[in-house]
Image (cartoon, rainbow, N blue to C red):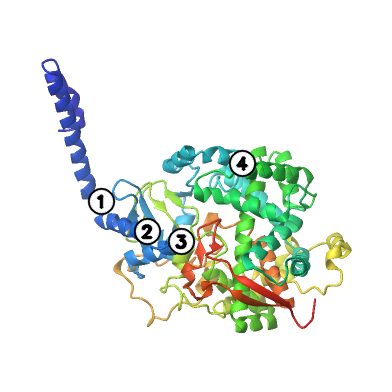
Amino acid sequence: MSMTNIPDTIAEIGGTNAKAAVFVAVLCLFTSAITRLYTSFRKTEWGEVKEWCMITACLQRGENPASNLIKALHEVSGMHLFYVRVRMFGLFGPHLIFPKDEGLVTHVTRSKKYVRFNPLTSVHSPAGRLITKATGLDSYINKYLTGSIWCNLDGPHAKRQKAVYHGYIQKSVSQNLSKRAYVFAKEFLRNFAEREGSEFDLFDMCQKLNAEMQLKLMYDYTLKTCSLERYVEIANKGFQCMYKFRAPEKDIIEDMDKLFEDMVANSGDDGFIAYFKKAHLEGKLSFDEFYHNVIVAVFLSQQTLPHGTFWPIARCAHDQGVLKAVRNDEDSLVEYVSEEFRIHGPSSPILMPYIALEEDSYGSLAVPKGSIIQIMPGLLHANPRLWEEPNTFKQKRFSSVVRKRLSSLSATIIGSDFDSDDEEEKKLDDTDLIENFESKALTMESISAMLFSRTDEQDALDRPSKKKMVRRSSSLENAPKSASKQRYIPFGVGRGICPAQRLGLTTVLNSVKALIDDWDIEIIDDKGLLERPSQDHILVDTISRPRNDIRCRIMKRDGRI
């Protein structure tokens, strides 16, 4: 009996017995629901339901969901498959696909059949929007974030905002900026040691270093409304609330309003804020787009950059062999940080998802309309089919690609985008920062050498030998052979690549170099963090915060500074 027969059935008996009519109506609805459920059962791959249950069970174990999720995905599929597909919430939810193959990732991120979306705000995520509304988070997001590139991930809004970002990066990132970042980091570390003492929490130091550097070099702004510690707290809690599904406390909101209002009103003419304000006044951005992108830039830079600085420093402190190598060879630093970012990516372990706007396929993988594609760099970076000994830190893993890029890069190739003019050099020479320092900043060639994203450069990265490769499954054999290969994605992939990655690398690499050039660093207590498997090092908390603190001690190196 179908749903269309219910009104006629009720009409036939409704005039004689009301109770019977209600009974028959309920029976008809129940029968129809069972029929639909049975049909759904037949169409559903039961393996997907089972794997969803297994993943859910794995997430219940221990206290670290980021680590457990990756372990769970490996457990349910085995390392040889090029994807994991589950049915969210068992039977009635959308298909959720986790790519483990670089070709599948590239296919999704380049195809017009898919769009990126923010699960908290997008029309493609009704459940997420319902949750934010029910928890009251929606009013906070609407006030501070909805106009930003973090919420507008695809379409004309994203394209327009990315153009402004790229314009700022093209204008600001130069050898002059690299020199200023290096000198600023040297000065900060000397003052930090005098102010805080020789023992400190490493991540706390990285957050303060990157906060001051971003305020000075990126925003051209001096803090007036709060202390540096309060600024870091505002940035952390302002973004962390998205993971907790509740708005920050009232005092954080009040201080946030004062901070951003002052930054917009009093930042200098050479910074990010002034550049975006000009774009707004020229009609390229609405006021919300301008203001919300300023807020998002503060939030995200205060998460990704400290994380990107923390792990290379921790590695140098933990492994004196690495420290010696990077001190002796500037190019070795770029190789080493490239490998560190493969193990500990600077951004979130879970990137913004894609949704299929129509049915699609990739080899043997059928992608129904409405499927969610969740890209996780860790699934690619830890896949033994793609990397030789993926869980082992290999300092020279990226050596051939980095050195090849360095040999092809020169000032004439980099062009005027990265060359500062005489006025900028004069401005630098006039600052107090440069006084009494011999500049050893990384060259823009070295920084650019880390940005290998072309297919041929990705293919040049090491792969496991055929003897050591996990046997290819039939599903992997059916993956397209001509797909582009994007298996190293620490900054995102496709349309989701961070538009400010070159700026971020300039500050991170020079911060690391400034510390190792002038200081010896000793780990006092890491609470066993560095002895854990690499997948168990982070928490999903304000992007990728280390699982626990590391107490360190720094000492002046050979009496220098």
**3 vs 2, front mark:** 2
Using the numbered discs, state the Cα–Cα distance from disc 4 to disc 2 in whole angstroms.
32 Å
Residue 480 showing in the rendered view? no
Residue of label 1: 44
Are the residues tagged 3 and 1 within 8 Å (C-beta)?
no
Residue 375 showing in the rendered view? yes
Which tag, 2 or 1, sits closer to the chain's start?
Answer: 1
Are the residues tagged 2 and 1 within 8 Å (C-beta)?
no
Which tag, 1 or 4, sits closer to the chain's start?
Answer: 1
Question: Residue sitting at 48 percent across and 56 percent down?
Answer: 109
In the image, is residue 28 above or below residue 396? Answer: above
How many labels, in total? 4
In the image, is residue 284 above or below residue 213? Answer: above
Using the numbered discs, state the Cα–Cα distance from disc 2 to disc 1 in whole angstroms.
25 Å
| Amino acid on which the number 2 mark rests in the picture | Gln
Using the numbered discs, state the Cα–Cα distance from disc 3 to disc 2 in whole angstroms.
12 Å
Q: Callout 2: few (<14), some (14-19), or many (20+) C-alpha neighbours within 10 Å?
A: few
**4 vs 2, front mark:** 4
Q: Which of 53 and 548 is in front in this view?
A: 548
Q: In which quarter of the image is residue 101?
A: bottom left
Question: Residue sitting at 45 percent across and 62 percent down?
Answer: 64
Whole-percent x, y for residue 418 in the image = 74, 63
Residue of label 4: 250
- Tell me the number on the disc at residue 66: 3
